[in-house]
Amino acid sequence: MDSPQAGGPPEEQYLGPVVRRREQIQPGTTDQRLLDTEGDSQWVHTDPWRVMRIQSEFVEGFGALAELPSAISVFGSARTPPGSKEYEAGVRLGRALVEAGFAVITGGGPGAMEAANKGAREAKGVSVGLGIELPFEQGLNPHVDFGVNFRYFFVRKTMFVKYAQGFVVLPGGLGTLDELFEALTLVQTRKVTRFPIVLFGSSYWGGLVDWLRGTVVAQGKASEKDLLLFHVTDDVDEAVALVTKEVAR
């Protein structure tokens, strides 16, 4: 660019890939603002700085999880009480997945997640918890042997899919539904392939399946073949057989 007149303000300012002109020009340089200890500290709360945090979470997550063996992500309610039938089913499921050769990945919380981690640990398998920063978060459950905590849901959700060969979904609430429908969308749009999704508990999931068939598919919002993207079962052995069969293809 042409040099500005000597002693006058610059006509253009280049800040990395950003070009500023006229009243958008900022005083000083990027290096100067970085090294100025008396500068405004609000920059640590800006979106560009958040991008760096997001990037660091991806790097840390990829680095930590890259060497995991074949794994299945198990989802379910944090409110499932210990000793309940659903909790015990989660324990049996975690144990059976390890015996089938999988690591078990959960959200690392209490309830159904804790149950699956407990089963995996008791079977001497790899018990993984991917935690999330929440106002009411209780931390990783004691049955997690390998844990990673995240600030951002979307980074954590990427890890659930990237490092698992399938999902088993126990009865759960909004977070569980969020993970379920994101996985279904990824499979439907072929963003991921060979990714079995098993819904455990026909009495819990039956109403949702009926709604998908009787309303969503019936009104043309989805196709009949989309109902083949998942399986429903009440049997732990069948759930493991379903994910094993599809992963082995």
Image (cartoon, helix red, strand yellow):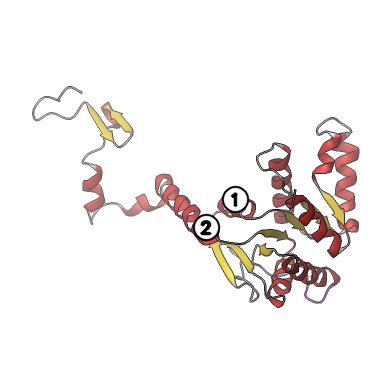
Q: Kindly identify which residue carries mark 1.
A: 158
Does any portion of residue 134 appear in the rendered image?
A: no
Whether pointer 1 and pointer 2 mark residues with C-beta atoms closer than 8 Å, the reply is: yes
Label 2 crowd (10 A; few <14 / some 14-19 / many >=20): some
Residue furthest to the front: 249
Q: Position of residue 106 (x, y in %)?
A: 67, 63
Dominant SS type (magenta): loop
Q: Residues in magenta?
A: 77-84
Identify which residue is drawn at 30% across, 30% down.
Answer: 20
Q: Assess disc 1: are there few (<14), some (14-19) or many (≥20) residues with their C-alpha within 10 Å of its C-alpha.
A: few
Image position, residue 64 (x, y; %): 51, 61
In-image side of 150 versus 248 (left or right): left
* Secondary structure under the numbered disc 1 in the rendered image: helix
Image coordinates of residue 92 in percent, x first then y, are: 80, 71
Q: Is residue 184 above or below residue 198?
A: above
Against 199, is 8 above or below? above
Query: Disc 2 marks which amino acid?
Result: Gly
Label 1 vs 2, first from the N-terminus: 2
- Compared across the picture, whether 98 is left or right of 46 comes to right
Please report the residue visible at 84 percent of the width from the left and 36 percent of the height from the top.
225
Q: Quadrant of residue 198?
A: bottom right
Q: Residue furthest top?
A: 2
Quarter residue 84 falls in: bottom right
Q: Which mark is residue 61?
A: 2
